[in-house]
Image: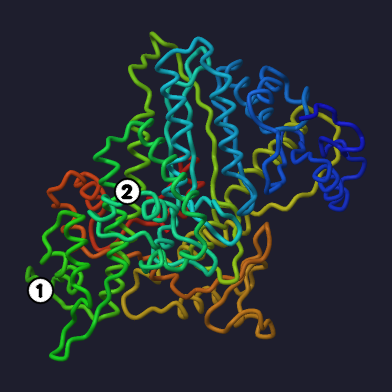
Amino acid sequence: MEDEEGPQCGKPDFVLLDQVTMEDFMENLKLRFEKGRIYTYIGEVLVSVNPYQELPLYGPEAIARYQGRELYERPPHLYAVANAAYRAMKRRSRDTCIVISGESGAGKTEASKHIMQYIAAVTNPSQRAEVERVKNVLLKSTCVLEAFGNARTNRNHNSSRFGKYMDINFDFKGDPVGGHIHSYLLEKSRVLKQHVGERNFHAFYQVLRGCEDSELREMHLQRSPSLYSFTRQGAGLSTSDSDERSHYQAVMEAMQVIGFRTEEVRSVHRILAAILHLGNIEFVEKEEGGLAVAEEVLVDHVAQLTATPRDMVLRCLLARTVASGGREVIEKGHTAAEASYARDACAKAVYQRLFEWVVNRINGVMETRDRDPRRDGKDTVIGVLDIYGFEVFPVNSFEQFCINYCNEKLQQLFIQLILKQEQEEYEREGIAWQSVEYFNNATIVDLVERPHRGILAVLDEACSSAGTITDRIFLQTLDTHHRHHAHYTSRQLCPTDKTMEFGRDFRIKHYAGDVTYSVQGFMDKNRDALFQDFKRLLYNRPHPTGYVARWAAGHHGGDQAPPDSRHTLQELHGGPGGKPGL
């Protein structure tokens, strides 16, 4: 890696541009990229361009060049930002935060890994055993979370399908002594279905390709992902078997280092297997009326893997318990459509709770131990936020709406911290400066989250209203409320725009670009109903893996799953928020 930043490489900091125009900005970015400079500063902000290839920019030698240096002593680099955050935390004994944002596929997850590697490399020179343990868990946790929370998409072969905020606690010496991971917005709908060219979460394929033959037989699984409804779509997109097995081995090693017990790992595999078998269950109408499972052996597999009575599994699949007035409770048989919906809701819920259990298990290992501020001094924190990138697909649904809303909130935070506060500081200090016009996206955020009239409020009201409220009626209500909003439109409001479909689509002009959303499924995904029968079934299971399911099933009351984490950024700021889940 060269330390020279000559004029032939363009300006290393965009504030040095002679003219600040979009054309000059893009030209400088292009020139630097062509010269192998993927990083450029805007003051203390680092702009990164994903090269989609391995570059010799990282490793021990590169870390040594940036360690202990000021931000501008070396060419722009992620290590310089990590070093600046670490030095600021250590010098001032103040908490710091690194926010990583960008569109899907921009390289955010890789950036967060490089930051973690830098922090691990420059800390604990005295080689204290407890600090080394914490560092190892911090580094290995990424591998495990990627297995359960990442998937192949059309934009990215290792796309994070959840948001992550990691706190790293440091002692007065600047060594990591603990940490905590907050996860947000797990895209659990991916368990059921993926777009063409995409895959389910990595964990399913890794288990099918990586487990020993004997363990697969115990779980009644075969190696081919094409045999299972939930992995069939992405079966032909799999990497080579050897790559899948090596990824599986890396995850197994990481779980061992973190402290997962052998039985816990096998229990996780059994739950993944149960989800795959659950997805293959289909329903048929009986001639004499009622419903039956097409292949009842799959019910046997699910019952065995979840250690639940077979007859109770079958009953939950075919019927639900409802209150009929007063205190009388009756069993109501499902239609085929209702049974399929209940099966899918159970599969999503189990996977989401499994993911949350994995995160909590890692947190339990990483938490600070025996720390007394009076004896050990005050701990400081570096936070690293790595959340979904802005997404635009051929068909955008509720998931993309939630993701892009979070990105709007993140952009609003960026505007407040970088632009608004900076200019207000100039005014307070009486510094002569030229006012810079910038777009404040508060009006877009308000469109989504405004009480009573915002899109989320209208959606929640539609879901809680009595009577038959459809996605189409929900869209009509949005059109009524926002017909004059500059950043909202639909085919009803703009009949000549044939890129949208009547009664189905609406468009938001986001800060990052226009996105057309299909309202089909918005209300179902927002309700996210999970019948009590499945909760009772899993909560009472007498099995070594029972703690996973019992903790999961006991999460919520009623027939509703947790509200989604649409308020992710509000939650990070201490505002209202819900449980993770799309």
Quadrant of residue 533 within the rendered picture: bottom left
Q: On the rendered image, what quadrant is the C terminus found in?
A: bottom left
Horizontal relation, residue 484 to residue 399: left or right: right
The percent position of residue 237, horizontal first and vertical second, equals 52, 62
The percent position of residue 454, horizontal first and vertical second, equals 51, 63
Look at the picture and state if 524 lies above or below 577. Answer: below
Q: Earlier in the sequence, mark 2 or mark 1?
A: 2
Residue in view at x 38 percent, y 65 percent: 230
Q: Amino acid at mark 2?
A: Glu
Residue nearer the viewer, 515 or 420: 515
Q: Secondary structure at mark 2?
A: loop
Q: Amino acid at mark 1?
A: Ile
**Are the residues at dot 2 and dot 1 in contact (C-beta closer than 8 Å)?**
no
The residue that mark 1 highlights is: 330
Look at the picture and state if 273 lies above or below 394. Answer: above
Residue nearer the viewer, 250 or 473: 250
The residue that mark 2 highlights is: 212
Residue in view at x 60 percent, y 54 percent: 104
Horizontal relation, residue 423 to residue 539: left or right: right
Quadrant of residue 413 within the rendered picture: top right
Colouring used for the render: rainbow
Q: Secondary structure at mark 1?
A: strand
Residue in view at x 87 percent, y 49 percent: 27
**Separation (CA) of disc 2 from disc 1:** 45 Å
Residue in view at x 16 percent, y 84 percent: 290
Residue nearer the viewer, 31 or 458: 31
Numbered circles on residues, count: 2
The percent position of residue 67, horizontal first and vertical second, equals 66, 19
